[in-house]
Amino acid sequence: NAKDDFVYAVSSDQWDNGSNIRLGRVPKDKITIKESWEWVCAFTPSYEAVWSHDLNESIPILSIHKWMGVPEMVYLASIDRYLMFSWRFHKDFSPEDGTDLLIFEAPEPYGPFSLVHVEEYWEGKNFTPYCPRLPLKWVEPDGVTCWLQFSGSWGVEGQKNGYYRSNVRRMRLIMK
């Protein structure tokens, strides 16, 4: 749902508690053609992305030490912003100690990003949710009420409590 003719893909350098997000793009009619993909490799002085077809030249579009789990980015036309959702283990490498939800926004898919929401112990300390997603079909007609989808805890407590499943939570964007 980007505002141009590209499909964008974000990736972190680690499944949980990574540090860097990279951005690739491809014309939407060439997704399966490997040579059509390109990655952000630099920024101009006015913060426009410079793209390269060589993945080895890519640079992070966002870096925060140990804060970047598997990301999800969507473009919301109703607010003309890109939203990026991420998560991290509250305690490094410990799925039994809860996770934190992180939401960023930007005017372009490459940024600059602002952190707009941090929720420590997202869904509580005994729940370890991960991989937050905002399915565009789950954005209500007002453009600001949404349904956040995420996976549930895979730890022993999560399995006992029935959290290890797909979960959904209502979310409302507040514009400032």
Image (cartoon, helix red, strand yellow):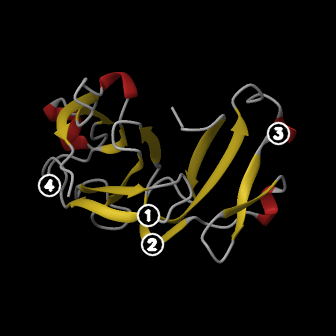
Looking at the rendered image, the disc whose residue lies closer to the viewer, 4 or 3, is 3
Q: Which corner quadrant of the image does residue 154 belong to? A: top left
Looking at the rendered image, the disc whose residue lies closer to the viewer, 1 or 2, is 1
Say which quadrant the C terminus sits in. Answer: bottom left
Tell me which numbered mark, 2 or 3, is placed earlier along the sequence: 3
Evaluate if marks 1 and 4 touch, with contact meaning CB atoms under 8 Å apart: no
The label shown at residue 36 is 3
Residue 149's place in the image compared with 137, above or below, is below
Tell me which numbered mark, 3 or 1, is placed earlier along the sequence: 3
The label shown at residue 64 is 2
Three-letter code for the amino acid on which mark 2 is drawn: Ile
- Percent x, y for residue 117? 25, 59
Three-letter code for the amino acid on which mark 4 is drawn: Lys
Q: Which type of secondary structure does the marked residue at label 2 adopt?
A: strand
Q: Which type of secondary structure does the marked residue at label 1 adopt?
A: loop
Residue named by callout 4: 125
Looking at the rendered image, the disc whose residue lies closer to the viewer, 1 or 4, is 1
Looking at the rendered image, the disc whose residue lies closer to the viewer, 2 or 3, is 3
**Which residue does the image show at 28% across and 37% down from the upper left?**
152
**Which residue does the image show at 82% across and 39% down from the upper left?**
36
Evaluate if marks 1 and 2 touch, with contact meaning CB atoms under 8 Å apart: no
Q: Which type of secondary structure does the marked residue at label 4 adopt?
A: loop
The label shown at residue 22 is none
